[in-house]
Image: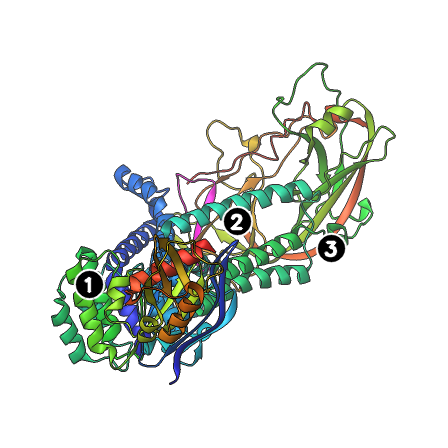
Amino acid sequence: MTAVIRTDALTKKFRRLTAVDHVNLEVPEGALYALVGQNGAGKTTAIKILMNLIPATHGAAAVLGTDSRKIRGKSYTQIGYVSENQEIPEWMKVGALLGYLRDFYPTWDLTLEQSLVRQFDLPLDRKIRTLSRGMKMKLALASALAFHPKLIVLDEPFGGLDPLVRDELIEGLLERASESTVFISSHDLAEIESFASHVGYLESGKLLFSEEMSALATRFREVELTREFDTPLPAPLPGNWLQPKASGAVVRFVDSRFDEQKTASDIQHLFGNVKDIQFRPLTLRAIFLAMARKSEEV
Amino acid sequence: MNQILHIFRKDARRHYAEILISLVLLALFTHRQLQFWLEGNESVHVGSLMFFQITRLITPILVLFWAFLIVRVVQAESLVGDRQWWTTKPYDWWKLLLAKLLFIFVFISIPLMLVQLFLLHHAGYSIFPNLRGVLLMQFTLPLLVILFSLVLACLTRNLSQAMLGVGLVLVVMIAVSWLSSELTRNTMDESSKFSQAIQGFLTFGSVILVPIWQFARRKTWASRGTLVASFGVATLISLIPSGHSVEQSHPLVAAKDSPVQFAIPAIPEAKKGQAVWPDYMSTAALIIPANVSAVAPGTMVLIDGINITSDSPEDSNWSRGWSGQYLQVWPEDQRKDLTYALKRKEYEGIKSKPLNLHIQLLLSEYQETDPRTLLVPISVFRDSYLGICRVTPLAPNAIQCLKPFQSRSYIARFDAPNSHCAPPKEYPRSNLAVAYAWQPPGAEFLADPGLNPMVDYSLTFNSVSRVSNPNASTQPAYSVATLCPGAEIRLARPVFKRQLRIQLDLPNTRLQDLVQGFPGGGPGGAVSIGL
């Protein structure tokens, strides 16, 4: 599968602050890739480099096979970009904006535009400055989808929106996702978990992992074992056991490279015979919490 | 082309209010230009005259509004920052730039050109022969306004930043001007043509290239840096002594070979304890009276500059080098006051010491050519060389003229004592003196900077200076010249003949004597024109 976005040791420094730190990323074609991380993790900076809005300090990035530094003008006929902090021409009316954009895109689909206007319930005669934040995001998304872009890049599109609008946006996005690759950044893990096919986790500018959601869900397990006696935890424990805690005879940890046979074998080796072992799947939120705490410990 | 027109239409819709205001201001400007003859006309209604005076501000307001409009239009797609909506849309940078230039052309340049053609037509000049002149005019003030506003708009994000930018430019200009005056001893040194060419290339090159580069790449800090560096280098070059001094352009000749002969009369001693200059003044001006003679008829000698040095043992290095004079010496002139400024501190240190002063003067000689007689009519008249002219009772010391694109160079002589024109009532006929008006020859292929193609200029007459006793350093006698209908004026074109330098010596002189007793009322007196 070809990569729609590929970065190679992508780095951005703002004086002493390293906002993006040697990020190697690959977004396969057709993926619905979610770049997640806390506020200030470097997600927006990374996206701005990909969109050639700011230059990288080191490293390189390619978007749709083009060096990101060369993305301008016609390149944007294939990229739909929506950002929560982008300035929309608020003096225009909704209909005028869509009409204005139409002439810029050879692939603009008027039927699709009308369908999106209906779906998002956009008031064509109203000035953009009078719209709510949610409506503005819907308009931005409609204008980014109506020309069948090969790549849709969304930077924190759901921030501060009420759940109803958020669901409408996600629904609209998913309806178009089959024909595009979607790259979305967010710090809200719950909304991402419901639709992302791939996920990357950015922490202080570093990409801690980037993989398919299904693989991630398989790879992480919460393990709970019950020993025969309450003894101190042996040391050292395997590096992939995150947040190990003992509570009496019960030991809990998150295995970040879960393989049922190997994990059971490691437990046997370290604890001897145990009364009970349970493996529980984790939510995306729980995985990221475990990862975040690990990085804090480091 | 579609995208250019598309962006242009969007901008026109967005800025229709500003466009309307700009056109209204242009209409007011046109109205004011048509009322030109109101000023100085006795019969005009006071209300109209007041309106005329108030509307003097129209031109600067119009120019400022154009700058504002350009900044607004360019910043509608701001080139500074990374949050703009348009930057992730398929805009071709050169189409965006052309759309903005098209806007400026359609809503600023074309209306202005139409107004200029209308003003020419209204003044009675044909449009087609003057079309080239109108086009050339677009490369003067309008181009400067457009380029400056474009650069400002390209390098700033919004109006506040643009205003801040203007403030910064003003501060830097003041600082550079101060630095230049502190560093440059010779105010008359000329830059070499090569250095002028480099300065022009850096200044205009950067002003043209930076917006293009900014549109193409939006590298704001690199663009700002390039502009600052270019202007910085150009300023530095202007501050570096060129080696092309005025001495080179004005070869030294013996005083006897000068087209004007100078003689300095006896200078009386200053009275003791007489305070001449207030303490807060940082410079002291020396005034040296000089009798002038031997200027040939049909000749004018311009004293371009002066430098005073001293070889006395008490001397310190107080000379400020060459400084401008720009005094005209006509055949009938008898006295000119030469002035020279030096630092107050230096002056106070040596003012009472006798010094051997060497005064060098830079002279330019001009000669009349194609002389003819012009009879002053009673009303507005057309002259093929001067343009449309008139004399007015409220501005009696000048013949006001209007001419397409550029004022004319001229030497005009009025022989008041031998004319039939009477002096004003309060003066006897003995106060009448010959009077001259002049405008040096210039680069007549260029248009004057401005918005109105009809350039107004005045032939302002000044009577020659006369002294009752050439051996005394008393003030020149007050002279008048009165024009009246039918008065004969000899009108000629000035032709540059040569530049030279002469030296006068003033031995055993105290500087304090040169600042007292010679208030320097200037040569001659006022000219009144009676009709």
Q: Badge 2, how many Cα within 10 Å: few under 14, some, many 20+?
A: many
Residue at mark 3 to residue at mark 1: CA–CA distance: 74 Å
Where's residue B253, x and y in %? 81, 49
Q: Given this view, does label 2 or label 3 mark the residue nearer the observer?
A: 3
Look at mark 3 in the image and give the residue it sits on: B244
N-term-proximal mark, 2 vs 3: 3
- Residue B68 within the segment the image draws in magenta: no
- In the image, which disc is placed on residue B489? 2
The disc label shown at residue B271, or none: none
Q: Are marks 2 and 3 on the same chain?
A: yes
- CA–CA distance in space, label 2 to label 1: 88 Å
Q: Report the amino acid beneath label 1.
A: Arg
Q: Is residue B305 left or right of residue B529?
A: right
Relative to B5, B232 lies left or right: right
Which is more foreground, mark 2 or mark 1? Answer: 1
Q: Secondary structure at mark 2?
A: strand
Furthest residue to the bottom?
A1
Q: Secondary structure at mark 3?
A: loop
| Label 1 CA crowd tier, 10 Å (few <14, some 14–19, many 20+) | some
In the rendered structure, which segment of residues is drawn in magenta? Answer: B390-405
Residue sitting at x 60%, y 54%: B232
Kind of element beneath mark 1:
helix
Give the labeled residue for mark 1: A166
The lab-note entry on whether marks 3 and 1 share a chain reads: no
Which residue shows up at 26% across the image and 69% down it? Answer: B9
